[in-house]
Image (cartoon, coloured by chain):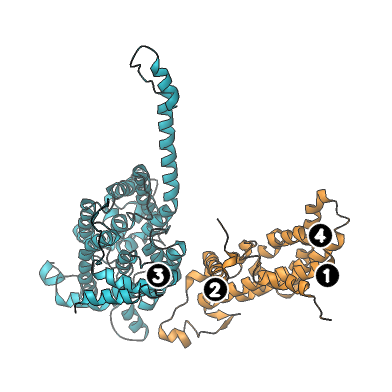
Chain colours: A orange, B cyan
Amino acid sequence: MALLSKKDTNLILDPLTDNNPITIQVLGICSALAITAELEASIVMAISVIFVMATGNVVISLMRDIIPSKIRIIAQLIVVATLVIIVDQVLKAYAYELSKTLGAFIGLIITNCIIMGRFEAFALANGPWRSFLDGIGNALGYGIILIIVGFFRELLGSGTLLGFPVLGDPITKTGLYATGYENNGFMIIPPAALIVVGIIIWVQRSRNPALVEEN
Amino acid sequence: MSLKSKLHELKLKYQGKKMAPAFNAFHTFLFSPDETTHAGGTHVKAADDLKRTMNTVIMALVPVLVFSMFNAGYQHFSAINGFPADFSLMNDFLTWDNFWIGIIKVLPLVVVSYGVGLIVEFIFAVIKGHEVEEGYLVTGMLVPLIVPIDTPLWMLAVAVVFGVVIGKEVFGGTGMNILNPALTIRAFLFFAYPTWMSGDKVWVYGARERSEEILAGANVDAISGETILGYLAQNKGAEMTYSVSDMFYGFIPGSVGETSAFLILLGGLFLIYTKIASWRIMVSAVIGSLVMGLIFNQVVDFGWIGESSKFYGLMSFDFWKHLIVGGLAFGIVYMATDPVTGSQTNKGKWYYGFFIGFISVMIRVFNPAYPEGVFLAILLMNVFAPTIDHYVVRGNIKRRMNRLKNATIYPKDSDGKAEELKAETV
């Protein structure tokens, strides 16, 4: 027997492509704009969201029968806030510099629409295992876009990847810089992230016209 | 066989094929097509199609381009040898040496702008299967005129691709764009490569090379080509040697084609005469910039801003001089009047133009990091233009509804027919 049934596999794979939280549902855009100037920050953000999303979905799914529906939003907020504080503290303890870069945005995972959206739409109606897979899938779908955007913004904007100068040194003019190439300062500022996300959306929809919205 | 019939055969050969738009474009770019309106039936005939409109703007730009080629050389040699003591137009300005600098520095910008832009347009026309649009004809001429002369060609190419794709094609091509593509290109360059778009080394050919030679240890004088706005932003207005007539005729450093207010004025009059550009936008933009300039002058007169203030240089600059330095005149005449991105209603054009002038001068003064506020002001008003139009149209509807409500229709005869009429119309 396979580890995952086909239905379960789709829970993970769908959000990566045809039901991506950022490019299709257009949720969680704010953090995608704010922290993707560097690849490292994007990766850490992606991992944090994967942790919060997967654990949160499981917890909510386990509690789904005992949460009164009138106060379910508050209950969800408490769960997600607890998890976010854990992530924040871990980052402060083990990666202080990075946690300073990410700043308020780790705390703002609480308000990330994707998380509350999945709690409401999935965890409240499904068992813990399937909720776990759904959480992993959606957070991965979010993370993958963050990493793509972070990759291009850091490469074109700073000429580095994860802090390593892959294109040469802009000050001593080595590597690509010797030919007159310059870093693109536009990629550092947040509007560039919007445009990169827009291009991803464009490419995705022209490859699969079924995704294009009617209007 | 003539070129025209060859192109026509090519066009027929590729009819219905994937590459058809590209061949159609070549055909109609140079000649009018063979298929014309046939007799019979009712047709509206007008000579001013999109291509004619675009060509008129280009005609208005040609004097500016030629002047800028001479000015490129004039600024280059003056920066090295000093400005000529008694300036004569024929001996110091309209010389082959000056023009040669223009050919090697300005012409490549034009070629790259057109080459890259048209390639992008052709690719999109082939993918989407529509005709190649003429929209790039004017943009391609504007772009080289609004960048500093030392802009590296690859940067220009990258910016043109960005501007045409993100600024225009994603919205659906010519006529559908929200932002002026030429200004999108300028804005991209400005934010992407700020060191190449501002400072005192980029406006005159040779200044950057000199400073690099000096860094490398060569024993030569540094040359600088600070713009007038640059001097003022640093409160160094007194060091400036340019006279008002230099500013007006354009013998000053600046972006390639923006310097000559005189030729831009002629171009503007030509565009107004041919009814291609809106005089309302031009006039209101001039008024807007004068009003803002006057306000700043008054602030200085009242003594609210002293000489120690970092705004003093630009605020105390005579209000009317704002129009003849920097890119304000060029922006007002050639960019703000873009019929696609500007306001469409006559009343809206007044608001749209006024705020362009007003905000341009405001950005100039308050943000010395952006001495060229005009491109930001126009882009901002491009975004607001549809909103302005919306409220103008709404206001018009409201006014007419009121008029209708209060209308009295005088009875034509005594049997009370007027009441019936009124009831029907309301």
The residue at which mark 2 appears reads as A153
The residue type indicated by label 1 comes to: Trp
Q: Nearer the viewer, residue B201 or A21?
A: A21
**How many neighbours does mark 4 have within 10 angstroms: few (below 14), some (14-19), or many (20 or more)?**
some
Residues at marks 2 and 1 touching, judged by CB atoms closer than 8 Å:
no
Residue name at image x 62 percent, y 71 percent: A145
The residue at which mark 4 appears reads as A125
The residue type indicated by label 3 comes to: Ala
Name the chain under label 3: B
Q: Nearer the viewer, residue B38 or A206?
A: B38
Disc 4 is placed on an element classified as: helix
Name the N-terminal-most of marks 2 and 4: 4
Residue name at image x 57 percent, y 63 percent: A212
Q: CA distance from mark 3 to mark 2?
A: 29 Å
Q: Is residue B405 left or right of residue A123?
A: left
The residue at which mark 3 appears reads as B125
The residue at which mark 1 appears reads as A129
Disc 1 is placed on an element classified as: helix
Instruction: Please tell me if label 3 and label 2 are on a single chain.
Output: no
